[in-house]
Image (cartoon, grey):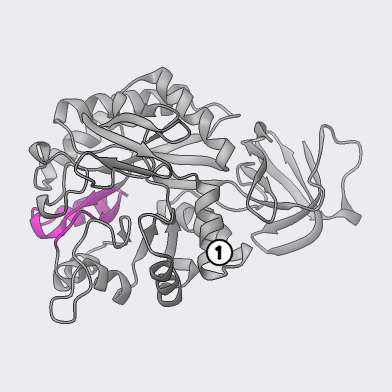
């Protein structure tokens, strides 16, 4: 395949009017239109629009009526096929707090998908984000309290064994209730530790940061805040060299908070995530999350008591909001939607338009409306 006449955002800079050539699911070449290869078919004309790396969503529970915790293989196919519409080409299937048996079922099903059903032409499940059960009841959010347990190496090893080697990529946990050595165990198993749903003090976060903690789950949401006498997770997120997730849906965070985070952290330390649940893409009504009733109204999803229950946001909408809230450049949006997550998770073939990388490519307009999404060299969505 040959993409022509696009504004190409490559790892080496912007090509104002260029091409990208795809061979065998990989990016084979790119350059300016005066160097375009001849006699290559099929040809996709980007017509001057942005050509950017496919989005990487490291925190997403569900979409299109499907949730990772359903432990349903056909459902995961539907999930993976729904995401290219919003520009997402790879993601971490995200679990939530439930019984060990229910989490095990979700891990086994996701493992089966990763091993046998990750085909081109749909978003690729790159691994698992284990969000829960290792959280603090004080900041449980929409995580069912009856299933919350303290982070332990024994239970984590059990989840690794069930999910398969290398499949758990990221774990959200509360450092203040974790067994000694827990964060070191994650790091030793090439798993990204992420503080979230936590009542940790700055000092407790800093202690784990020095042992390998690198990430903050949905920054500002469901964690101890910034206070001038009792600094918590939010203060640590600002003060330490941590990468922070942002749910930039206009609901979870006020635009001025988003603007402040970008000013302090910079675009290289922000990862945009959707944290979306199964109601994304569906009409308003009643849905379920972890056995709890969730009510979707417009762009909000809440438990019956009003607690936010993830989002129903699409990744391209989060990217557009980030531009509106902060005046971020397209280059910065590329970093926050693709490059940073891929780097943090060790996904060397993702997140960049670079020779040898997977041909995960999005063509979008200046309003971040997706025109076409290509997943590993196969067109997955066309407007």
Is residue 336 among the parts visible in the rendering? yes
Residue drawn at the location 22% of the way across and 66% of the way down: 233
Residue drawn at the location 57% of the way across and 70% of the way down: 327
Quadrant location, the C terminus: top right
Residue drawn at the location 28% of the way across and 37% of the way down: 95
Report the side of 298 relative to 39 (left or right).
left
Quadrant location, the N terminus: top right
Report the side of 346 relative to 189 (left or right).
right
Residue 93 or 38: which is nearer the viewer?
93
Q: In this view, does 276 lie above or below 107?
A: below
Residue 369 or 7: which is nearer the viewer?
369
Whether the magenta-drawn stretch holds residue 125 is answered as: no
Residue picked out by circle 1: 324
Q: In this view, does 29 lie above or below 328?
A: above
Say how many tags the image has.
1
Whether the magenta-drawn stretch holds residue 181 is answered as: yes
Q: What stretch is highlighted in magenta?
A: 171-199
Residue drawn at the location 41% of the way across and 51% of the way down: 345
Report the side of 303 relative to 117 (left or right).
left
Q: Is residue 361 above or below residue 62?
A: below
Q: Which residue appears farthest toward the bottom when viewing the image?
A: 228
Q: Quadrant of residue 160?
A: top left
Q: Position of residue 305 (x, y in %)?
A: 19, 43
Residue 302 or 131: which is nearer the viewer?
302
Q: Where is residue 368 in the image (x, y as percent from the top left)?
A: 63, 52
Q: Is mark 1 on a helix, strand or loop?
A: helix
Q: Where is residue 382 in the image (x, y as percent from the top left)?
A: 69, 34
Q: Where is residue 16 in the image (x, y as percent from the top left)?
A: 79, 62
Is residue 350 among the parts visible in the rendering? no
Report the side of 212 relative to 62 (left or right).
left
């Amino acid at each position: 395949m040959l993409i022509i006449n696009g504004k190409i955002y490559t790892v080496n800079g912007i090509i104002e009017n260029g091409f990208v050539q795809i061979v065998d699911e990989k990016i084979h070449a790119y350059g300016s239109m005066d160097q375009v290869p001849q006699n290559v078919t099929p040809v996709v004309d980007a017509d001057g629009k942005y050509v950017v790396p496919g989005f990487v969503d490291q925190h997403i529970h569900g979409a299109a009526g499907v949730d990772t915790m359903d432990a349903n293989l056909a459902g995961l196919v539907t999930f993976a096929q729904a995401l290219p519409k919003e520009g997402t080409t790879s993601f971490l299937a995200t679990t939530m707090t439930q019984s060990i048996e229910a989490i095990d079922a979700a891990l086994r099903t996701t493992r089966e998908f990763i091993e046998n059903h990750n085909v081109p032409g749909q978003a690729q499940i790159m691994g698992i984000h284990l969000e829960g059960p290792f959280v603090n009841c004080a900041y449980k959010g929409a995580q069912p309290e009856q299933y919350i347990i303290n982070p332990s190496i024994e239970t984590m090893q059990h989840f690794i064994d069930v999910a398969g080697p290398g499949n758990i990529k990221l774990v959200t946990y509360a450092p203040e209730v974790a067994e000694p050595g827990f964060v070191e165990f994650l790091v030793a198993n090439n798993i990204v530790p992420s503080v979230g749903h936590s009542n940790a003090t700055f000092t407790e976060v800093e202690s784990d940061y020095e042992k390998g903690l690198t990430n903050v789950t949905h920054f500002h949401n469901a964690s101890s805040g910034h206070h001038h006498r009792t600094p918590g997770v939010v203060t640590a997120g600002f003060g330490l060299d941590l990468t922070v997730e942002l749910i930039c849906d206009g609901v979870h965070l006020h635009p001025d908070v988003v603007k402040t985070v970008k000013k302090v952290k910079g675009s290289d330390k922000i990862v945009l995530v959707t944290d979306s649940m199964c109601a994304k893409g569906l009409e308003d009504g009643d849905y379920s999350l972890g056995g709890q009733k969730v009510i979707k109204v417009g762009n909000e999803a809440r438990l019956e008591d009003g607690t936010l229950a993830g989002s129903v946001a699409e990744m391209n909408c989060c990217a557009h909001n980030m531009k509106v809230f902060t005046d971020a450049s397209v280059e910065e949006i590329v970093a926050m939607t693709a490059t940073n997550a891929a780097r943090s998770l060790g996904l060397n073939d993702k997140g960049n338009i670079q020779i040898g990388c997977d041909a995960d490519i999005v063509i979008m307009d200046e309003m971040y409306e997706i025109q076409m999404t290509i997943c590993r060299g196969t067109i997955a969505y066309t407007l």
